[in-house]
Image (tube, grey):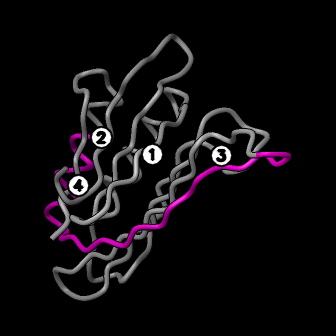
Amino acid sequence: MRRGIEVEQVWSDEHLVELELRVSDGESLTVNRVYVGHEQLTEAAEALARFDDPASGGEFELSFGVFGPEYASGAFCGRFRYFAPGRLLVTCVQEREFREFGSLNLANSATTHLRSEPALLQRFATELRALAAGMGEVAFLEAI
């Protein structure tokens, strides 16, 4: 697995898209799936594309699915933050589908921290927009 965030469309119908998210720091890999509405995916891709001003020191949150046992499938949250010129910090939290574990209903989860660069983020945003428009199947944010 390449180091970074890989988003792949695995299924869709007229209402929903199922995405598989693979996040790797080069030593570990966490994979989960989420359901997202077409409109939500498009809005998220457009908002990420506008997050392109490293000088602002801003933060952006990319979320798919909903965390918690009452929702179908899993959830993903990526928090992007410009740290210094040319430096982007990304914290990814992933939660898998809840399942029975003895008398409990639990989900596996993971947090991964990555570093990237503004130019790589813009390429990822472009690929995510293509995926949302039905013109691509995979978007990848390379980590450095």
Q: Where is residue 127 in the image (x, y as percent from the top left)?
A: 22, 40
Closer to viewer: mark 4 or mark 2? 4
Q: Mark 3 points at which residue?
A: 66
**Between marks 2 and 3, how big is the CA–CA gap?**
19 Å
Q: What element carries label 3?
A: loop
Q: Mark 4 points at which residue?
A: 141
| Number of numbered tags placed on the structure image | 4
The span picked out in magenta is 102-128
Closer to viewer: mark 4 or mark 1? 4
Badge 3 density bin: few <14, some 14–19, many ≥20, Cα 10 Å: some
- The verdict on residue 93 being magenta is no
Q: Do the residues labelled 3 and 1 touch (CB within 8 Å)?
A: no
Of the pair 9 and 44, the residue shown nearer to us: 9
Q: Are marks 4 and 2 in contact (CB under 8 Å)?
A: no
Q: In which quarter of the image is residue 42?
A: top left
Identify the residue at image location x=75%, y=39%.
100
Q: What is the number of the mark on residue 44?
A: 1
Question: As shown in the figure, which amino acid type bears the numbered disc 3?
Answer: Val
Q: Name the residue under label 2.
A: 128
Q: Tell me: 141 left or right of 68.
A: left
Q: What element carries label 4?
A: strand
Identify the residue at image location x=33%, y=57%.
50
Q: Residue furthest bottom?
A: 84
Q: In which quarter of the image is the C terminus?
A: bottom left
Q: In which quarter of the image is residue 141?
A: bottom left
Badge 2 density bin: few <14, some 14–19, many ≥20, Cα 10 Å: many
Identify the mark nearer the N-term, 4 or 2: 2
